[in-house]
Amino acid sequence: MINALAGSGPVQIAYHVPDPEAAAAHYAELFGWGPFYVMRHIPLEFALYRGRDAVFDHTSAYGQAGNLMIEFITQHGDDVSALRDVYTKAQTGIHHVAYFVPDLGRALEEFRNLGYELALEARTVTGVDFAMVDTVAALGHMLELYERRDDLEKFYSYVRHKAQDWDGNDPVRIMNT
């Protein structure tokens, strides 16, 4: 058993899509998910792809489906990345399932010890560390891990709160990054 995930459930399902804004509008109308908050070209302090310096220029739309956050994510360009490992620019599908872990370093070490490779390690300019563990062969998608932080939990709470009693208007909202 992976101790870092014991007793916790996923907090997010992320779909790779060609256009997060269009996907957000479509699934808000189709399933009532949302509203979605779009962050374009999310700035990173650093990104490592499989242990090497990398560029990970991406845009994401975050919304709510019941108790679970939904992310629509795309990568700008075709640089090697955890996204391009699974999907081409034009393809759509589940890319990763995200979890909060109590200690990111310890969780990543557990996965490494079990033979899983880290596809991405990164930090946002706001200081949020995250990683994608390559579990594609085992699960059909990657796992994204975040260390539990107040600012990250506030963002998840904000999106969840905005979804409560949402009337379907203004389904796609642009956030400054």
Image: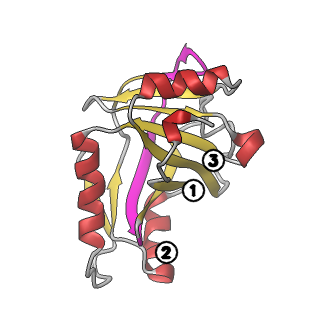
Work out how far the residue at label 2 is from the one at label 1, CA to CA, in angstroms.
Answer: 12 Å
* Residue at the spot 37% in from the left edge and 71% down from the top edge: 34
User: Residue 17 — which label?
Assistant: 1
Quarter holding the N terminus is top right
Placement of 110 over or under 8, stated as above or below: above
Label 2 amino acid?
A: His
* Residue at the spot 66% in from the left edge and 47% down from the top edge: 141
* 145 sits left or right of 125 in the view: right
User: Dot 1 surroundings within 10 Å: few (below 14), some, or many (20 or more)?
Assistant: many
| Magenta span of residues | 47-66
User: Residue 26 — which label?
Assistant: 2
Work out how far the residue at label 3 is from the one at label 2, CA to CA, in angstroms.
Answer: 19 Å
Q: Is residue 62 magenta?
A: yes
* Residue at the spot 67% in from the left edge and 54% down from the top edge: 91
Quarter of the view holding residue 93:
bottom right
Q: Is residue 138 magenta?
A: no
* 136 sits left or right of 151 in the view: right
* Residue at the spot 30% in from the left edge and 54% down from the top edge: 156
Q: Which residue is mark 3?
A: 89
Work out how far the residue at label 3 is from the one at label 1, CA to CA, in angstroms.
Answer: 8 Å
Label 3 amino acid?
A: Lys
Of marks 3 and 2, the one in the foreground: 2
> Percent x, y for residue 109?
55, 21
Q: Secondary structure at mark 1?
A: loop
Q: Give the mark nearest the N terminus, 3 or 2.
A: 2
> Percent x, y for residue 112?
63, 22
User: Dot 2 surroundings within 10 Å: few (below 14), some, or many (20 or more)?
Assistant: some
* 90 sits left or right of 63 in the view: right
